[in-house]
Amino acid sequence: MSVNEIGEKDLNVQSFIERQVAEISAAVGGGLAVNALSGGVDSSTVTLLGHRALGNRLKTYFIDNGLMREGEPQFVVETFRKLGVPVEIVDAQDAFFSALKGLSDPEEKRKIGITRTFYRDVFGPLVKRSGAKFLLQGTIYTDVEETVAGIKAQHNVLAQMGIDTEQAYGYKVLEPVIALRKPAVRLVAKALGLPAAIADRPPFPGPALTARVIGEATRERIATARKATVIVEAELADAGAFQCMAILHEDRVTGIRAGAREFGQQIEVRCWDTRDAVTAAPTRLPFDKLTRIADRLTSEVPGVVSVTYNVTGKPPSTMEAV
Ligand code: XMP
């Protein structure tokens, strides 16, 4: 791995920002660049760095892959409108769901369902049409580390996986925050003026809810995971955790509802305490909180008859299920 980490203690936020802005300007020259904004802290930070460097020569897209959380496209567009950054929503739901069809292997879902669809099928034509030669993206140090170690192919790690984006997709990728881990990115985000709703946002994975659906990610199963996510995030908002999530299992189990048998679905709740996501421990949640979440999930999410809480740390678990 040829990236050198800049630790939080070694980070001079202002000079980091100035250096990255200068590097983006120098690389893009008088040309155009594009970036995809997901609303997470990493891509939001890169959007503001790129905007500072290039102004309206940076075109920012929100790719609506149909796999995000409830209300996400509107939240992101509105937040950045207030910051003076126009964001265009691209409806790519059909492309992602057709690529994910029939895929249940975790790495196939990541590499074929998400990475290839995003860079080749959705972004390739967009970049070509725009005339841009550069894509700015928010890869961070941890993404590269886990991908290179062969644990999970993070959706946005390309060069280190031997992918030459210029040859494969027709554009170069610039990664201004690749030397940073999440806590350092948050410092840069705040210094750039991103509101706390973004700068302090819990992470959300690039493959979005596909990382939280074990087995095939159909529209219907993603919708179930999305409904469960709303409940789990609302109930655990005050838990002080790094990240919490609802995972839809593939196996069904026999349940009983209104006196009748229901061969239903299982949701696993995960909630993590960690600083850098490299190792993590399950949050010690009160049992009353867990039973309240179980009551809500089984009564508000159609088809769910069983709820479990993960008590395994990372390692040997990983934080996302897929
Ligand atoms: P894991 O599941 O690898 O997750 O223990 C560690 C942290 O990384 C996030 N994550 C991702 N982030 N692209 C991302 O940008 C990905 O493909 C991806 N997979 C996992 C995860 O949410 C957790 O915070």
Image (tube, rainbow, N blue to C red):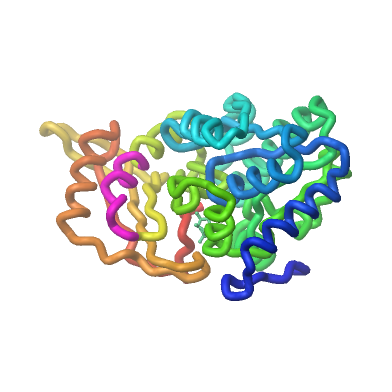
Relative side of 206 to 69, left or right: right
Residue at left 74%, top 52%? 21
Q: Inspect the magenta stretch and tell me whether residue 203 lies in it.
A: no
Q: Which quadrant of the view contains residue 280?
A: bottom left
298 shown above or below 278: above
Residue at left 84%, top 29%? 131
59, 116: nearer the viewer: 59
271 shown above or below 305: below
Q: Inspect the magenta stretch and tell me whether residue 236 lies in it.
A: yes
Q: Which quadrant of the view contains residue 11?
A: bottom right
92, 73: nearer the viewer: 73
Q: Which residues are magenta?
A: 229-240
Residue 225, image x, y percentages: 40, 39
176 shown above or below 48: below
269 shown above or below 10: above
Ligand 1 shows up in the quarter that is: bottom right
Relative side of 94 to 167, left or right: left
Residue 57, image x, y percentages: 77, 34
- For the N terminus, the image quarter is bottom right
Relative side of 5 to 322, left or right: right
Relative side of 123 to 273, left or right: right
